[in-house]
Image (spheres, grey):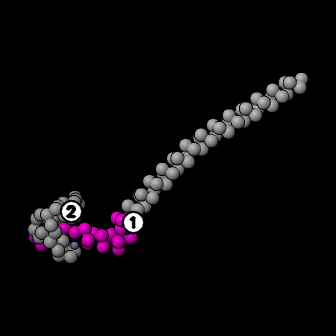
Amino acid sequence: MTIQVVKGCPLPAGQCVGCGNYQPPDKDVIDMDVDVNWGDNLYLCQTCVGVAAGLLGFEHPDVVAKIRADLDQAESAHKAAVEERGVLQQRIDRMLDGAKAKGEAKKARKQ
Ligand SMILES: [Zn+2]
């Protein structure tokens, strides 16, 4: 059994088994690759798949897209913060090296 996405419902019964609607030939539907009623194919339209997915607790695609966009933005902010931290750490290291050198120079002058 190979569940796949096909355009429309190209083979008999030519309609969604969930709602009974016929689908336009350019519309993606799920072909369950199951024979029913002696030769009919079992198709599920996007609406029925969405309802079933919601009942199973899957998020709506718009929610998933929003979460992905938020994650991309958070990852970009994290990357920028890590880069800024690196620049600041280099500056701190140079300041500490300078302070150490200054302290050593003062110490050498006193001797
Ligand atoms: Zn349907």
Provide the residue span drawn in magenta.
35-64
What residue would you read off at disc 1?
63
Q: Which of the 4 quarters of the picture holds residue 37? A: bottom left
What residue would you read off at disc 2?
28
What type is the residue that disc 1 sits on?
Answer: Val
Which residue: 27% across, 69% down? 49
Q: Which of the 4 quarters of the picture holds residue 6? A: bottom left
- For the image, the number of numbered tags is 2
49 falls in the magenta region: yes
The answer to whether residue 36 of the structure is visible from this angle is no
Inter-mark Cα distance, 1 to 2: 20 Å
The spot of residue 62 in percent (x, y) is 36, 65
Quadrant assignment for the C terminus: top right
Which of the two labelled residues, at mark 1 and mark 2, occupies the earlier sequence position? 2
Which residue: 17% across, 74% down? 21
The answer to whether residue 6 of the structure is visible from this angle is yes
Does ligand 1 reach within 8 Å of label 2's beta carbon? Answer: no
Please rate how many residues cluster around mark 1, counting C-alpha atoms within 10 Å: few if below 14, some from 14 to 19, many from 20: few
Residue 52 located left or right of residue 28: right
Please rate how many residues cluster around mark 2, counting C-alpha atoms within 10 Å: few if below 14, some from 14 to 19, many from 20: some
What type is the residue that disc 2 sits on?
Answer: Asp
Quadrant assignment for the N terminus: bottom left
Q: Quadrant of ligand 1?
A: bottom left
Circles 1 and 2 in contact, beta carbons < 8 Å: no
Which residue: 76% across, 34% down? 99
Front tag of 1 and 2: 1
Residue 56 located left or right of residue 24: right
The spot of residue 27 in percent (x, y) is 19, 64
